[in-house]
Amino acid sequence: MKTQIFCDSADFKVIKKFNFSPLVNGFTTNPSLMRLSGAKNYKNYSLKLLSVCKKKPISLEVLGDTEEDMLNQALVINSWGKNVYVKIPVVNSKGLFCGKVISKLSNQNIKLNITAVYSSNQVKKILKCLNKKSKTIISIFSGRMGDVGKDPIPVIKKSVSLTKKIKNIKILWASTREPYNYLQAKDCGCAIITMPASIIEKVSKFGKTSQELTLDTVRKFLKDSKDSKFKI
């Protein structure tokens, strides 16, 4: 199975660029990325992104923390485009499972991206709430697991196993840290991996031989040494 690459960014120029790239199949954003990209008004900025990303899936996250706020905001965000996936956290800031929100939205056939998932048990709980005919992405934060010494591979493999017979539900490898994560996600049978533009650029160069890598490295070091004007 081909593992699709989504670009994790809210930068307008980046999304405009990769919207036309065959390497990138979709986009994921979040409020933090929006803020870093200079957004002042969440709706207006989201619509600006959607003005260039009209067909590829793009995930836009709710801002609320209560069931009522999440539901209301999800309906609004969903109305912005047919290619929009509404991001809902698996739990709120109090640690309460957002199952009711997920269930209500899924039963309205709203495309969802369930985010901040860290375990296969959370995946099992999510699956019980979903309308299996509605499209859903489940984002497992593999990179953040690795940051604290947890191996994400077993979680990804178990989650892929739980969803492999459900056509409309996809497991996404999130918080990518290095290009090699793409090969790991592919090996696990993960449907999607999302990564920042800098890592996508590196993945696009996959396939170099050991000799080519050696030459690239030596030439880079030589250029740096000349630019430094060091002498021995």
Image (cartoon, grey):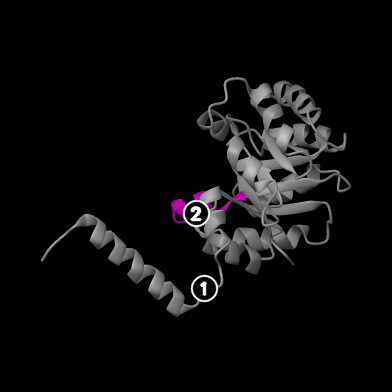
Residue 165 part of the magenta segment: no
Residue type of the residue flagged with mark 1: Lys
> Dot 2: within a 10 Å radius of its alpha carbon, few (fewer than 14), some, or many (20 or more) residues?
some
Residue ID for mark 1: 208
> Which residue is at the front of the view, 91 or 176?
176
Marks 1/2: CA–CA distance: 20 Å
Secondary structure mainly formed by the magenta segment = helix
> Dot 1: within a 10 Å radius of its alpha carbon, few (fewer than 14), some, or many (20 or more) residues?
few
Residue 143 part of the magenta segment: yes
| Residue 145 visible, this orientation | yes
Give the residues in magenta.
Answer: 140-149
Above or below, comparing residue 140 to residue 43 in the picture: below
- From the viewer's perspective, is the residue at label 1 or at label 2 nearer? 1
Q: Give the residue at x 81% y 43%.
A: 130
> Which residue is at the front of the view, 183 or 140?
183
Relative placement, left or right, of 185 versus 26 is: left
The disc label shown at residue 177, or none: 2
Quadrant containing the N terminus in the rendered view: bottom right
Q: x, y percentage for residue 182? A: 59, 62
Quadrant containing the C terminus in the rendered view: bottom left
For numbered disc 1, what is the local secondary structure? loop
Q: Quadrant of residue 97?
A: top right
Q: x, y percentage for residue 88? A: 69, 35
For numbered disc 2, what is the local secondary structure? loop
